[in-house]
Image (cartoon, helix red, strand yellow):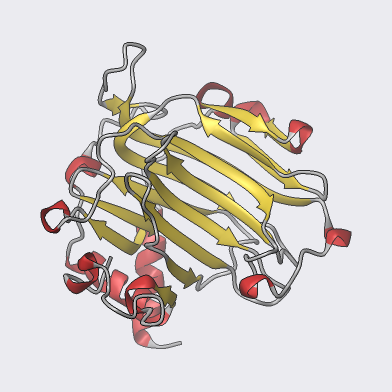
Amino acid sequence: MSTTMSLFLLLSIIMSTQAPFAKADFNKDAEITWGDQRAKILNGGRDLTLSLDQASGSGFQSKNEYLFGRFDMQLKLVPGNSAGTVTTFYLSSQGAGHDEIDFEFLGNSSGSPYTIHTNVFAQGKGNKEQQFQLWFDPTTSFHTYSIVWNPQRIIFLVDNSPIRVFNNQESIGVPYPKNQHMRVYASLWNADDWATQGGRVKTDWTKAPFTANYRNFNILGCPKSSSGSTSCGSSTSSNSNEGWRTHELDAAGRNRLRWVQSKHMVYNYCSDKQRFANAVPAECKRSRFL
């Protein structure tokens, strides 16, 4: 293992121990929305499992909607042959012209690395995909996946280490999600028409049910009140740290981001010359790290 990678992994471990977790309660902060008994809240609200079989997947959502915040979730993904399955953790508004910030975990045949699919939608427009292959096995233990969303930028983090930054570049005409409240959503579903190797590897239903585990659902943000206004503060946490409001990467964070993107990025829409043959999106001209 190289010295650079060893230092990165050490920093990741140190940073992950500093994540702002409170005692999560899925009973209080989330509601199961589909899948019948395939979704289960366990251990007094501390844990939640989602399952997928040939009849249906399952999912849940946050009870509150938010306009900006930091959203943390610990996941342990489907083990073994998970080809065709997609496990998700994302933010989304509703209706036409919706906003959305996505973590999607694309299943794999046994022995192949999981792929993290990220995307950002603003005013109904997405097509800003980046994909990464994880540098660890996400099925053997829990890891922390986080979204920091403030008026300046969106930061995707894995174990508190940044993998992607999407900056607010409305000044050059790029839509940015800043006006619509979003809920937190999570799901496990079948997408074997595209999820694994572009749909070439199908779901093996003899391995069903497939199960993903969630815990430590933590939000520091601005929930929507019953009157429709936004109230800032903490939701599932008593931690008053609101650094997410202006969070940006320091020098160490930028170095970690460069390491992830140079070593583990497997798709970047900004580099897709076939897709954008005439001109790359405007934001791609500003920065490599989006």
- Relative to 227, is 29 on the left or the right? right
Compared to 221, does 124 lie above or below? Answer: below
- Left or right placement of residue 2 versus residue 88 in this view: left
Q: Is residue 77 visible?
A: no
Q: Residue 113, how many percent across, how many down?
A: 60, 74
Residue 289: x, y in percent? 26, 70
Percent position of residue 258, x then y: 29, 75
Residue drawn at (43%, 40%) of the image:
92
- Residue 257, position in %: x, y? 30, 70
Q: Is residue 34 above or below residue 12?
A: above
Nearest the camera: 129 or 221? Answer: 129
The residue lying toward the viewer, choosing from 114 and 124, is: 124
Furthest toward the bottom, the residue is: 2
Q: Nearer the viewer, residue 35 or 250?
A: 35
- State the image quarter where residue 228 is shown: top left
The furthest residue to the top: 227
Q: Which quarter shows the C terminus?
A: bottom left
